[in-house]
Amino acid sequence: MKAAIGLATLAAFALSVGCDRAQAEKKVDQVPVGSDVQLTRADGALVEGKLLDRNTDAVKLDVGSTTRSVSREDIADLRVKPDAAAPAPKAAKFREITLPADTRLVVRLDTPVSSATSAVATPVRGELTEAIVRDGVTVVPAGSRVSGVVSSAHPSARVKGRASLALSFTQLTIEDTRYPISARYSRVAPATKAKDAKTIGIPAAGGAVIGAIAGGKKGAAIGAAAGGGAGTAVVLSTRGKEVTLGRGAVLTVRAGRAMTVRVPIAS
């Protein structure tokens, strides 16, 4: 008897799912292409945009910064959006908002780094100082965590070889959800050619002479004669400036790739 009741319940559930699927399919085919729509997926995600196209397998939406393709099997509901302030469908639990690849991230470093002391692959962490807002919705709140590594670090060399430092941010964490990003930051230490030329005692236009000294070429003797030798020795023994970013340094980077973020819908 219990087995029969269980089979009947299962059959009723399957029939209900089948009806829901048929209704969803019907709605997908009834919405005119070009309409502003609200698409609710079976997992509760709400995607809003313009209906660009549909076929037997999927529908394509323009979500403002890119296009999204959603399988018909994943669609629980599709409707024309009544107006800009239309409430979310009851089945929707969160919005999926896609940020474009060039989205600006303002990061405050928690990790001090330097071209002179940091090694490649050293972990780097920070947090966003500014929220990312789209259409009045806070997609990424201020304080969200950013992490990555030192991707390149070259200390200053003597005379030639300016210091440089590069960071790669690979992950953005919003509350407990992690999103991959591909944001890079790089800086090269300022040149000291004009200062070095002044130390040697020749005009900045004489940089070719300094280059000859650095390269150990025949022109080194000419440089020593023009600069008096002593000034040249100072330049040769002094390294240039390093690139140093202390804890609390604020950097502006770009996300590097489009990123779809889930934003809870207020009840």
Image: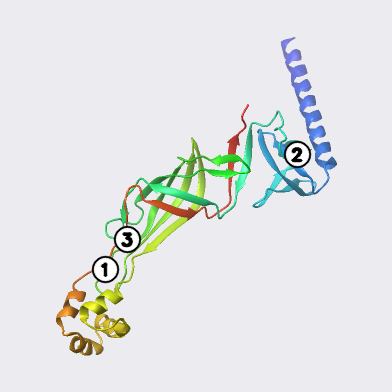
Q: Residues within 10 Å of mark 2 (few under 14, many from 20)?
A: few
Q: How far is mark 1 from mark 2, CA to CA?
A: 60 Å
Q: Which mark is residue 240?
A: 1
Q: Measuring 25% from the left and 87% from the top, which residue is drawn there?
A: 217
Q: CA distance from mark 3 to mark 1?
A: 10 Å
Q: Is residue 141 or residue 90 the one in the foreground?
A: 141
Provide the residue designation for mark 2: 83
Q: Secondary structure at mark 3?
A: loop
Q: Is residue 136 above or below residue 207?
A: above
Residue in front for this viewpoint, 40 or 112:
112
Query: Is residue 240 left or right of 110 when viewed as pictured?
Result: left
- N-terminal of the two: label 1 or label 2? 2
Provide the secondary structure element on which disc 2 rests.
loop
The label shown at residue 243 is 3
Q: Tell me what residue is drawn at x 72 percent, y 11 percent.
A: 2
Label 3 to label 2: alpha-carbon separation: 51 Å
Residue type, label 2: Asp
Amino acid type, residue under disc 1 in the picture: Gly
Screen quadrant of the N terminus = top right
In the shown orientation, is residue 52 left or right of residue 159?
Answer: right
Image quarter in which the C terminus is found: top right
From what the image shows, is residue 252 above or below residue 31?
A: below
